[in-house]
Image (cartoon, helix red, strand yellow):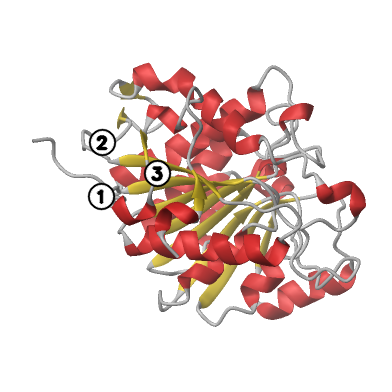
Amino acid sequence: MRGRNLISPIPSGLPSFLNAERCKNLDDLEADVAIIGVPFGVPYDLAGMRSPSAPAPAAIRAASQRFVRHLGHYDFDLDGPTFAGQDVRIADCGDVLMQSGDFEGNSQRTTEVVRRLRASGAVPLVLGGDHAIPIPVMRAYDDIGSMAVVQLDAHIDWRHEVNGITEGLSSPMRRASELEFVSGMAQFGIRGTGSARKQEVDDALAYGARLIKAEEIHERGISAVIDQIPDSETYYITFDADGLDPTLAPGVNTPALGGLTYYQAARLIQAVAERGRIAGYDFVEVVPDNDVGGITCMVAARLTLFTIGAMAHAGQIGHQPA
């Protein structure tokens, strides 16, 4: 299938992420980093047929506009210019083409789009959508040899199925564990109650997943837990917005008290970039209708920008200005 038939480019009049160049045909993509929206997921019931996270990619793009005019300035969170003085080519490829009710087709197109982005040499940064999205995204990495997965989330997402659905938002980490090329897994920010029962926790621990509770991070600090990141040359980061504290990210499906702070999340991302190459990233589960003053979308945009900056500072992307 031709590249332009796999995506829905950003409509005229709506902003791209950071006002980045718009890609209308994946066959023409030339970028270090490619933003791609996946504005849906897999519902568990009739009520979920319209995902509350479907508007999130557009809302995060809009929120990113507040950072545009400062991109060349000194970034105190990164101790230098945001992109480390490098030219970093960012392209916004719009959204994966979604067809109503075609969940299998939507999943297949998501995998194919991510394959195309990777084949072009760009690092895919995915804006969701719900937490079912990493399942088809990670399947596009089957040629990578091995990679470790780092999750920031309130929940462990190890359900095998819910209502007979095996690829929904409660299952991405179990599905990731089944991929032969996933070499390890660390899950940061776990707390409260969610879909997991004792069996799911036992299964995660038996697999070797490292479960780092938010409480431990608050008590010991980030520097004391980053050694829980598995050793790997390559990493995939999946970030559920409810991994953050609801005072910082109120616009989520399932807010959970005691979540990570902005700096805890940023330092975890930075630690990953310093340990190995970030091959992909997603930020999911933002619900714009639940947001307060747009703060969740702003934080999602900022942490996505921070991830690009951390990759540039680690020498993974960018080139010297001409």
**Marks 1,3: beta carbons within 8 A:** no
Q: Residue visible at 73% across and 46% down?
A: 215
Vertical arrangement, residue 2 with respect to residue 304, above or below: below
Coordinates of residue 201 in the picture (x, y in percent): 80, 69
Sort mark 1 into few (<14), some (14-19) or many (20+) by Cα contacts within 10 Å. Answer: some
Residue bearing the label numbered 3: 24
Residue bearing the label numbered 1: 315
Coordinates of residue 64 in the picture (x, y in percent): 49, 26
Sort mark 2 into few (<14), some (14-19) or many (20+) by Cα contacts within 10 Å. Answer: many
Picture quarter with the C terminus? top left
Mark pair 3, 2: CA separation: 28 Å
Vertical arrangement, residue 109 with respect to residue 34, above or below: below
Q: Residue visible at 30% across and 44% down?
A: 312
Picture quarter with the N terminus? bottom left
Residue 94 in view in this figure: yes
Q: Amino acid at mark 1?
A: Gly
Q: Nearer the viewer, mark 1 or mark 3?
A: 3
Q: Nearer the viewer, mark 3 or mark 2?
A: 3
Mark pair 2, 1: CA separation: 9 Å
Q: Amino acid at mark 2?
A: Ala
Mark before the other along the chain sequence, 2 or 1: 2
Residue bearing the label numbered 2: 84
SS for callout 2: loop
**Marks 2,1: beta carbons within 8 A:** yes
User: Among all residues in the image, which is located at the extreme bottom?
Assistant: 180
